[in-house]
Amino acid sequence: MSLHQTLTILTTLLAAGSAVPTPSPTTETSSTFPHLNALAQAKGKLWFGSSIDTTSSSVQDPTYMSIFNTASIFGQTTPGNTMKWDYTEPENGVFDFALGEETITLAKQSDKKVRCHNLVWTSQLPTWVSEASWTKESLLEVMKAHITKEITHYGSDCYSWDVVNEAINYDGSYTDNVFLNVIGEDYVTYAFQYAREAIATLGASADIKLFYNDYTISRPGSKVTAVLDLISKIQAAGDYIDGIGLESHHTDTYYPSVSDLSTVMNQYAAKGLEIHITELDVACKSTPCSWSGQLGQAQAFYNVIHACMENDSCRGMAFWDFNDKYNWIQPSTNDGEGDATVLWGNYASKPALTAVVEALKGESCSVC
Ligand code: G3I
């Protein structure tokens, strides 16, 4: 029986009486926060990172920024919003890269690689794209212009681009969007082709990797089968895709096992893809997250990091924020779910942070 299961039973038994004692958390600062990036790199990985949203008040929080800016803590970042279509091309042919540049500047100041995110996605797509009447040719032209402008603007400041995001539903069908409806399923391949062509215009020194990024692809099932088919289709069309991002939005009660993760990672690796753990956060189904919930959360974080550390094709991992105050899953807007990161809003650490460190070090989980 795991510590998590034991404590779940104890918590239930003692619910009416005194609470199960919980260890005192550390209140983290940049001096105490574990050096996750250094730990990952010591074991041969490219990085451990975290997203940043420069439109959020997090960037005005000195404690937050001093942790974020410490290169040994985070060696990679991803803009949480500011390179998406609604920010970068709010009107047809009118481009604005200023907010995205803020992330590039921050990354350069603390020696971070940037996973640029994203080029073609159903969400955060301006209505001039999603609600206009297009022919296949006119929408392909608009999609190509968008991809080309973003890639050539940011150039080698991007380690990689998430070219297409979340194209497949849980049941394996294609996600409904304007690109699918007007262009057909091939819009995905076209997007990768245009991205590769844009990189070629930057010259031989531009080595920017092209990724497909999606959620619920961490355990075998219909969606993973469909995503593998999609990758085969892109690869049959040309040398267009380099990697896959496993968005890791899990919960304290539903998360992949190490065995599930290693099965699917081996399938992606067999396609020759570089694997990244992206967007890692683990929401508690009810908040404030109970002690038992925190241990389930720790197990979820541990499984994901451990599986990546064990797989040579899995090259890097990143949180989708590292403080509950700023994570996108807030109880007020997500039916009470939240507390999804390794730190409480007041910077007190959770068992999940211990679990992440132990997974990076190759140790067993003491808090799972
Ligand atoms: O910018 C406006 C601001 O002007 C306005 O005052 C405010 C009022 O609510 O909204 C602001 O926009 C919000 C934006 O984040 C920036 O904070 C949107 O409402 C909000 O919907 C948007 O949420 C983002 C979400 O993608 C949208 O789908 C999250 O921050 C972002 O973390 C999340 O990230 C996605 C990944 O890109 C892809 N995978 C899933 C992941 C989680 O949904």
Image (cartoon, rainbow, N blue to C red):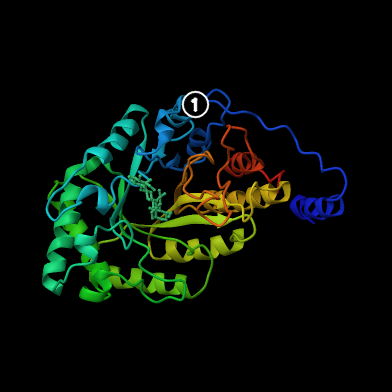
Residue type beneath disc 1 = Thr
- Judge from the rendering whether residue 301 lies leftward or rightward of residue 92; answer left or right: right
Q: Is residue 22 left or right of residue 230?
A: right
- Front-lying residue, 227 or 363: 227
Q: Judge: label 1 CB < 8 Å from ligand 1.
A: no
Query: Is residue 246 depicted above or below 23 in this figure?
Result: below
Location of residue 103 with respect to 28 vertically, above or below = below
Residue drawn at (14%, 46%), measured in percent from left and top?
A: 202
Q: Quadrant of the N terminus?
A: bottom right
**Percent coordinates x, y for residue 145 in the rendering:** 14, 57
Kind of element beneath mark 1: helix
Q: Position of residue 263 (x, y in %)?
A: 54, 65
User: Is residue 244 rendered to the left or right of residue 25?
Assistant: left
Residue at which label 1 appears: 63
Residue lying at 59% horizontally and 56% vertically, measured from the top left: 251
**Which residue is pictured at 60% across the width and 45% down the height?**
359
